[in-house]
Image (spheres, rainbow, N blue to C red):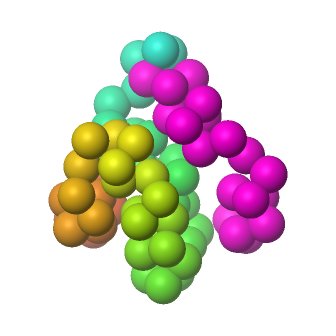
Amino acid sequence: MSDSFLRYTDLAAAIQLAKSHGMSTEQIIRALTGGMVYKDALRLARRAAPIMDLSVQEFMQLRKNLP
C-alpha cells in the first residue's frame, strides 16, 4: 500500500468504519499495514495508534504477531 493512498484517506473515519463493521483491532492493523515494509508501517503507526488508543509499540507488536 503506498503512502499516497493514505494521504487521501481520512484515517480516523476508516478506522471507525472498520470498527462499526465488527473488525477487531488486529484485523484493522492487518488491513492497514498489509504489504507494507517496516519503515512505512512505523510511519502509519505513528498516525493510527493514537486514534486506536494504542501506543506505537503496541501497534507494531500487534502487526508483528499477526499470522
Residues in magenta? Answer: 1-19
Taking depth in this image into account, of 54 and 28 the one nearest to the observer is 54
- Residue 65 position (above or below residue 8): below
- Residue 31 position (above or below residue 42): above
Instruction: State which quadrant residue 25 falls in.
Output: top left
- Which residue lies at the image location 41% right of the left edge and 63% below the top edge? 45
Instruction: State which quadrant residue 62 falls in.
Output: bottom left
**Image location (x, y in percent) of residue 31:** 52, 48
**Image location (x, y in percent) of residue 18:** 51, 27
Q: Is residue 8 magenta?
A: yes
Image quadrant holding the C terminus, namely bottom left
Instruction: State which quadrant residue 23 falls in.
Output: top left
Q: Is residue 55 visible?
A: yes
Asked whether, in this view, residue 3 is left or right of residue 28, the answer is: right
- Which residue lies at the image location 70% right of the left edge and 69% below the top edge? 3
Q: Tell me which secondary structure the magenta stretch mostly adopts.
A: helix
- Which residue lies at the image location 50% right of the left edge and 65% below the top edge? 44
- Residue 54 position (above or below residue 46): above
Asked whether, in this view, residue 48 is left or right of residue 54, the answer is: right
**Image location (x, y in percent) of residue 66:** 29, 57
Q: Is residue 65 visible?
A: no
Number of labels in the image equals 0
Image quadrant holding the N terminus, namely bottom right
Q: Is residue 67 magenta?
A: no
- Which residue lies at the image location 54% right of the left edge and 37% below the top edge? 12
